[in-house]
Amino acid sequence: MTATETPGPLPTVPLRPRPVPSGEAVARATAFHETMARRRTVREFDTRPLPEGVVEWAVRTAATAPSGAHVQPWRFVVLTDPERRRRLREAAEAEEREFYGRRASEEWLTALAPLGTDAEKPFLEQAPAVIVVFEVHKGPRTPRPYYVKESVGIAVGLLLASLHQAGLATLTHTPSPMRFLNEVCDRPPEERGAYVIPVGYPAPGVRVPDLTRKPLEEVMVRL
Ligand code: IYR
């Protein structure tokens, strides 16, 4: 066995900043906030197809996320084939029936009641695409990742932001447990399903719960 050599630092390249004049910074941040504040989780989708290439660009954006030791421990499986999405729905609903019928505590069900969710997941077939996001753990073909949940969580945030600003709606669905996703998506065991994200145009006239977001004073502390 040979001792592992500690690699030296990578060569460097110039940062390629996109400078924003300081007088424009607040206007830019406000405009981005106005866009993002209108993102809502949508549970009913139009079946019309997505513009060619939009998912690919969103995944490229997601994959710009920072990651522990730059291991980039993510895989994005894009399901558009109706038969795959039917299998996904069938397996997800089987888990969800267990969740709603037995596994979830009364407290958890009470917290979910205002959102009106249940074990039926028609959106997995309605939406023209479903992105299944996997964490990539150490395996025969993959290095040990660090801060996997944080890295993949940041990537998913960027994915949702990209799709939203392109005019598409998403739903962050987290069936539990998620092992069935390996089989449905043909992924090896070192990959672990983390998010199931239907993507599409919202169904015409769709309504969403009248939620409010916590104001800045409640979410930010200045010291
Ligand atoms: N995974 C279930 C339950 C669920 C849990 C939470 I926390 C939510 O915010 C919404 C749903 C489901 O998808 O129905």
Image (cartoon, rainbow, N blue to C red):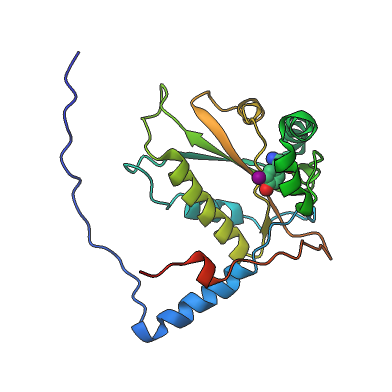
Q: Quadrant of ligand 1?
A: top right
Q: Report which quarter residue 14 is drawn in.
A: bottom left
Most extreme residue toward the bottom is 23
**Residue that appears at 16% across and 20% down:** 3
Question: In the image, residue 84 lies at what x, y percent?
Answer: 72, 34
Q: Which sits in the foreground, 196 or 174?
A: 174
Residue 97: image x %, image y %? 79, 32
Residue drawn at the location 71% of the way across and 55% of the way down = 200
Q: Is residue 75 left or right of residue 132?
A: left
Q: Residue furthest top?
A: 1
214 vs 184, nearest the viewer: 214
Residue at the spot x=18%, y=49% of the render? 11
Placement of the N terminus among the 4 image quadrants? top left
Residue 66 visible in the displayed image? yes
The quarter holding residue 206 reads bottom right
Q: Is residue 3 above or below residue 121?
A: above
Residue 53, visible in the rendered structure: no
Eyeballing the image, is 223 above or below 81?
below
Q: How many marks?
A: 0
Q: Is residue 98 left or right of residue 219?
A: right
- For the C terminus, the quadrant is bottom left
